[in-house]
Structure formats: C-alpha cells, structure tokens
Image (tube, grey):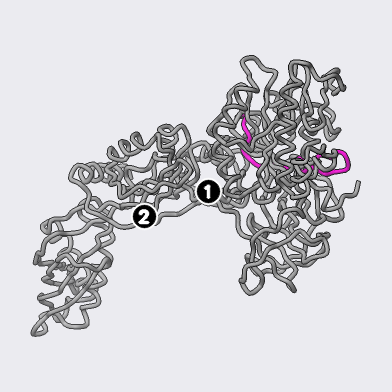
Amino acid sequence: MSYSTQTIRNICLLGHGGNGKTSLAESMLYLTGATDRLGRIVDGNTVCDYDAEEIKRQISISLAVAPVEYKGCKVNVLDTPGNFDFSGEVLQALHVAETAVLVCSARDGLSVGAERCWKLLKERKLPRFIYISRIDEENSSFDDTLAALKARFGDSLTPIVLPIPGGYVDVPAGKAYEYKGGKAVETAVPASASGTVEELREVLKERAAETSEELMEKYFGGEEFTAEELLSGLRSAVLDCSLVPVLCGSAATGLGTTALLDAIVALAPDPTRPAGRPGEDGSGSPVEIKAEPQGTTCAFVFKTVSDQYGKFSYVKLLSGNLTSDMSLINLTSGNPEKLGRLYTMKGKKSEEVKQIICGDIGAIAKMDRLRTGDTLCDPKAILKPAPIPFAEPCYAKAIAPKNRGQEDKVGTGLLRLNEEDPTFSVVNNAETHQVVLSGAGDIQLDVLVSRLKSRFGVDTELTTARVPYREKIRKKVRVQGRHKKQTGGSGQFGDVWIEFEPCEEESLVFEEKVFGGSVPKNFFPAVEKGLREAVNRGVLAGYPVVNLKATLVDGSYHPVDSSEIAFKTAAQLAYRAGLPQAGPVLLEPIGELKVTIPDSFMGDVIGDLNKRRGRVMGMTPTGDGDQVVEAEAPMAEMTSYAIDLRSITQSRGSFTFKFVRYEEAPTAAQQKAVEEAKAMQEEE
C-alpha cells in the first residue's frame, strides 16, 4: 500500500517501566493484522523486545520500531524503554516523533517515569496523548489515576474515551462500544455514564472553540458543531498542546486499542503539521527544516543496530525522498555516501522497499561509516538538524577482561556497542591504567558486560574506578643526589645538589644556578630529563607530582666517568631523597556538581552531600517545583552518586558532575588513599 506524507503518523510510546508500552504496541500490531498472534513479555515473543537481554530481563532496553497500517494511515509506533538507565533511547524516539503517547497504569497511578517523561514532552512542546493501561486488572482505577494525573499535569488532560463495564464510550462521537469476541460492538451509552459523557463533550467543544474565532463565535452562539468542525478544532488543540486527550484500555484483551488508533489517525499531527524543526544550512545559519516531499533530501540517523545479520541505520526522512543507490553526503564526517538497500523495520524483521518517503521512518543496510546522530543530505543544498540532546554519562566503573590478553577484544566490542548506544563512553585512563566505562547507571553497564560476552565472547568484570590523585610538597628542601658506580672499566659518576620547592605552575619548573662549572652545561638536560621522569611517580602513593620547582644549584663531575645517564640517575636519587622531607601531601580532584531535585527532597540531598564532604554553593529554583543545587564535592566520594541519588529522590533527581580543580585532601582521606595505593601496588 502506498502512502503520502500526510497519511503517516510517527508516535512514541513512553512512560514508567512496567506500565504496558510494549504490550500496547503488541496489541496494535495484532489488531491491525501486522502480526498473527499476540505476543507476551513473559513468553519472550513480543515484536519490540527481541534482544536476548530484553527477553532475559523482561524489560525493554532499546528503542524498537513497529509500523502498523490502519484506516489508510501508516502509524510508526516507537516503543521505548521505561528504565531510566536507557533514557537515551527515549530521546532518540522523541527526536523523530511528531506525537507521544504517555502510558500510565490504572493500577499504579502517577509514576516517577510519567513525571520525567512529561517534563521531556513539555520542553519539546510535543503533542501528546495519555493512555491509561490495565484498566481491567484488580485494584486498578481509571478515575483515581486520571485525578492524580490532572492534579500533577493540569486541566489540559481531557478524556475522549471513558471506560464502562466491558467496553468504553467514544466521548466526541457520543457512542458506546462493548467488547465481544475481541471486537468492539456498538451499544447504548449506559445511563450512569451519560451525564459524565455530556460534561466531557462540553469540555471538548470548549477546547475546540478556543482554536479559531469562527468556532468560538459558533460556540458562544449556542450552535452545535458538525463532526468535522469538532474534529478539526480538537486536532488544532492537540497540536498546540492545549488539549491532551486521555484514553484507556487493556492491551491483554485489546479493549481500547482501536480507540487509541482512531484517535492517532484523527487527531495526531502528520509530519507536515509542525512548523519545522530547528537546524542549520550550509553556512551555519539557523533554518527551519520542513517536511516537504519535493524539498532537499535530508535523512537523520536516529538509531544504529548491529548484530550477526549486519548493520542497520534507522533514519527519519525529514525532507525529500530517499531511494537506494542515491549519492548523499554525511554532514558529520563530510564523506560522500552511496546508499545501500532500504528497509522498513518491524522489531528485528526487515522488509526491503524501493524508497522511503518524506516523513517516514526506515532503515539503510550495511552503511558501516554511519553513526547515530549523522545526517545524510543532498550536497547541493545542506540542511543539518539539531543533534539529539543526550545526557552526559554520570556513573563510571573500570572494566577489564577476566582473562589476560583479551584487552583488544574488549576494546573492539565496546567500540561496536558504542555505535548502537552513544549514551555511554569509554576512556583509557593512562594515569590509573584502567579502561573506564561510563553510562547512566548500573543496569546499563551490566547489559554492556552481558553483550560483550554474548556477542564478542569475552568475559569482563566491573570494579570501582580509581581516583586520579596528585601529590605536591609544602616546603623547600636542599638535597644531594650522588651516583657512583665502578665496574672494572670506565665507571659512572654524577653528583648534584638540587633545591625542591612548591610553585604555582602545574608541570615541573626546572632551573639551574650552577656557579664555577661544578656541573658542566652539557649535563643540565640529563638532570632535567631525570626529574621529568621522576615526577610521574610521587613518594606518598605513586601519583604524579605537580606544582614543583627544582633548581640545580651545585654538584661535581668526573672527567672520564661522568655521563648523561649518571647525572639523570643522580637527579632521580635527589628527588627520592628530598621529597619525603618537603612535607608531601595528596591532592584530590574536586568536581562541580549540579543536582536538579524537587523541593521536597532538598533536606535529604543536602544531608547526603555533607556526608560526602560536599560544599553547597547555592540553590536556584527552576520555576516548576524543582531546585538546582550547586555544590563542589571530591570525586572520590561520588562514585556511587548516580545510584544513591535515585534512592534518595525516588528517581526524581538528576545531576551533572565535572572536574574543576585539585585540592589538598583532609588527613583521613589522604591516609585512606595512600593505604589503598600501597595495597594496589602490592597486588601488582
């Protein structure tokens, strides 16, 4: 079946984990004939949760695309994870969807996940629906859940579907349906619900009237809207977010699924309805990228999937049309790219197509150089959309293979996985001799470890990442370094006197003030080289020494036995002898912390920061009930903060943490760090 841009709907399902997003997608697929059986999460046979890790853990980990055909429209359903460790997948979906469906459970009511998702939708001003799931389960309440949602999100939430025993009422149409044999059959509106239905219809008419002067005049004149006028007004109200339609149902029985699809087709904007998305042209000037079928070809890569079957680059065609063998330019790398075969994806299943039309979502196969966030564009007319605003990784662990010699395998595996998931980072820290893996939380890192084993055959383990301390001295000392060695033939002789003192410069400052030629000038570079090598390892705990000035003031030499290596060794002997006398101390890295939390958790968060030796610098209200706490804290105390903050704030808090400087560590912290360093050296 062929579609136009106007008959495409791109919707993302989002909400708290376990609220029924994947089951709802499964119900949509089954009831539209896209699948011939209703998959279940417990059976591990759903279309959207196809990855081995998703089946094992029974949670969504990756964004999945599930297109369905309904009433002449193609609805691209983007199923997203509810676990906060995989919020990057949600951001990918939001970047390419025109509408969101926030799924909330009638059994659990208002959840933290719903609050976080609402904040994302509000920031993007994205049209949205709310779907209250599991209304047929024990201890579920549509009314209580709706009341809690309205209290938190406002009166723009208005039901367009009302549950009744065994069915629902279509409020705009004023019709009731019973579910019989898996199908909706029209029935009379129950007398007990008729009053509520009329009240809600009146609210919907008011919302519609607010979208145009013509409808407003008609409304105040007491005239009845036609069905098309009401629909047109509601569509405009959804687009400007003054109306958030609320629907309900049960994915297990299919109750309410077709009503949701009806609402998506009738009320959700197609890709041409938004005014445009922000971007840049070839000169870097801001432009609005509009969904124009005859416009410049511009395809945004919002997801990458690599598996044993190959690599697929998921694209949203923002403008123009896409056909295989097309030659475009990758705006990220500047490389020309000739497109491979094009596909539509349904979970892990691919179906080859000849073209992807403007506004649609598809995939390109075997584009090895493409990465998530790249843009493919006609080189003659550059259009570059804004990037996906991924959060900075905030939870770090050191990763290493369990068996030596597999370090390259770990590196290759993580590089491949990073193509799929750009929300984690890998840094090979030369100071601490560790590969540090950073992500959103412990579950994300655990999944990466599992995938390294299942896909690349390498067993790895996660350990606490070491803190890169520094050392410095506090007082001035003058010491001798004397190296004398006689080995039968020519010997080695080097003798230096060096003054060591603190200075402001971070790297070593070397000077010489030798009088009378006691040390020949040609040996000065050897002395400096010896010291520069020595400062890489401090005398307290083996950490690099900073803020050190070394002045060569005297010494002696032998006309035959003195050499560069002898003076280099003498300088290092002076270093090892002098620094322990110069009041060495440990410096710890301090980071700038910004924590965004609801007001109600302020006391607990401040108390926790005090325990971590944090210093609160200020607090700024955000205007929506949250506060941004600005503080400074030692990195050594922040290794588990991502997990602990979730626990303290019931997952409502978020933070950023960036290194700013080094500071002298308190005595107790120094002692602990020195002991840990010595224990580590003994192990090695």
Residue identifier under label 1: 424
- Seen from the viewer's position, the closer of residues 165 and 98 is 165
- Tag 2 and tag 1, C-beta contact below 8 Å: no
Q: Which residues are magenta?
A: 57-76
Q: Position of residue 308 (x, y in %)?
A: 70, 44
Q: Position of residue 412 (x, y in %)?
A: 57, 52
Residue identifier under label 2: 659
Answer whether residue 71 is magenta in the image.
yes
Q: Secondary structure beneath disc 1?
A: loop
Answer whether residue 14 is magenta in the image.
no
Image point 62% across, 71% down: which residue? 285
Q: Secondary structure beneath disc 2?
A: strand
Let me know if residue 279 appears in the view: yes
Q: Residues within 10 Å of mark 1 (few under 14, many from 20)?
A: many
- Seen from the viewer's position, the closer of residues 152 and 108 is 152
Q: Position of residue 213 (x, y in %)?
A: 74, 50
- Seen from the viewer's position, the closer of residues 437 and 680 is 437
The residue at the far right in this view is 1
Labels 2 and 1: the sequence-earlier one: 1
User: Disc 1 residue type?
Assistant: Phe
Let me know if residue 349 appears in the view: no
